[in-house]
Structures are given as C-alpha cells and as structure tokens.
Image: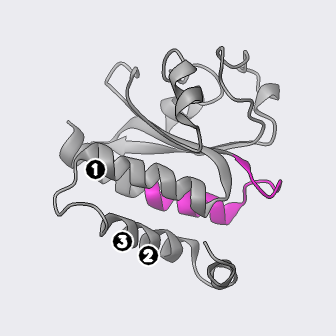
Amino acid sequence: MTTKDTQLAKNIDPEVIALRALAEKLSELPAKPRPDESLQVVADLARTLTFAAYCALAITDTNNDTEGFFVSGLDEITLRHLKTAPQGHGPLGSLRLDGMPVQFDNVSEHAKAFGFPPNHPEMERLLGVAIWSNKEVRGALYVTDRSDGEKFNENDKKILLTLAKHASHIVTEEWY
C-alpha cells in the first residue's frame, strides 16, 4: 500500500478495503483460477492489509487435520525447513473448535502454548479467524506480529473476517 492508500484506509470501512483489494488481486488471476491460487491471494492480502509479518491460511479435513496450507511472509528456505504445517493443537485449537476469533498479545503465554516446532519463526502477537464450510469450521486464517509493532485492532479483525468469508466460499465451492 502506498502512503496515499494508507491515508485513505483510515477513512474507509475495513471491509470495503478488503473487498476492493480482493477484487483487484483476483482480476490478475486467470479467468478460472485454481482454488490454491485464490487462497494464496487471500493469505497475501491478509498479511498486507493488516501490516502483519506473517500470515497463514490452513484448510482442514473433517478430522481437523491440515490438508491445505498457504503462507505469506516466509521465504522459501524457511518454509522448506518446516517439517509439517501446523495442526492447530496450541493456541489456535480453540478457534478450530468453536469458530470464534482468537487474539493474543503474547502467544507464548497462552495456556495451551508449548513452543514452536523446529525452524518455525518466532511470533508474539496473533489474530486468527475461522474458515467455515457447510456450517463447520474447516480452517483458519491468521496473522502474526504487525510490522509497526502495534497490537492487532478491530479493523484488522474485520479485514480478516471479510477475507475468511471469501476463503470459505472457495473451500465450499471448489476445494471439496
């Protein structure tokens, strides 16, 4: 986003910002994009629009195992060194169980935190929302650590919820 875009963003509904950015980025894809291409756009926009260092979008199966995983903000080398996609057993676990947004100012202090897997980048702040399909939580969209050092705010949550609705549509209509 440019400085002008950032100034405009302060005066525009965050849902409108997310939908405009989504329409612009999706228009750059082929006429009939693959679901993975569209979900990567969602992850990239979530990171950019919330000023996050990292974003992940996980799609889960009926047993809550991760079957699709999209990241933004990690370089290829770091990504290759991660053994598996997160399975949502730690602080994200509650989001996958009840579908309610989660927000932590220090994820390591969460009662279910047990550390990061080997080679996982350190993260402090986290904001996550559910991805729904057919009235079930079938994934999560989450961002970590704003680049400006600020806490995630209500506008960030609205942006993620808007993008997660689009991801939910993709998962329902094209993933399964």
Element at label 3: helix
| Labels 3 & 2 near each other (Cβ < 8 A) | yes
Is tag 2's residue or tag 1's residue first in the polypeptide sequence? Answer: 2
**Does any portion of residue 110 appear in the rendered image?**
yes
Give the mark, 1 or 3, whose residue is nearer the N terminus: 3
Q: Quadrant of residue 66?
A: top left
Q: Of 112 and 119, which appears nearest the observer? A: 119
Q: Is residue 100 visible?
A: no
Q: CA distance from mark 2 to mark 1?
A: 17 Å
Identity of the amino acid at label 1?
A: Ile
Q: How many marks?
A: 3
In screen coordinates, is 133 left or right of 34? right
The CA span between labels 1 and 3 is: 14 Å
Instruction: Report the mark closest to the observer, 1 or 3.
Output: 3
Estimate the x, y position of residue 48 in percent, counting from the top left: 58, 59
Decide: few, some or many residues near mark 3? Use Cα within 10 Å; few <14, some 14-19, many ≥20.
few
Q: Residue at x 45, y 58 (%)?
A: 163
Which element is circle 2 on? helix
Region rendered in magenta: 145-164
Q: Nearer the viewer, residue 1 or 96?
A: 1
Q: Is residue 111 above or below residue 168?
A: above
- Which sits in the foreground, 86 or 140? 86
19 relative to 36, above or below: below
Q: What residue would you read off at disc 1?
A: 170
Q: Which residue is mark 2?
A: 20
Q: Residues within 10 Å of mark 1 (few under 14, many from 20)?
A: some
Residue drawn at x 69%, y 83% as measured from the top left:
7
- Disc ID at residue 23: 3
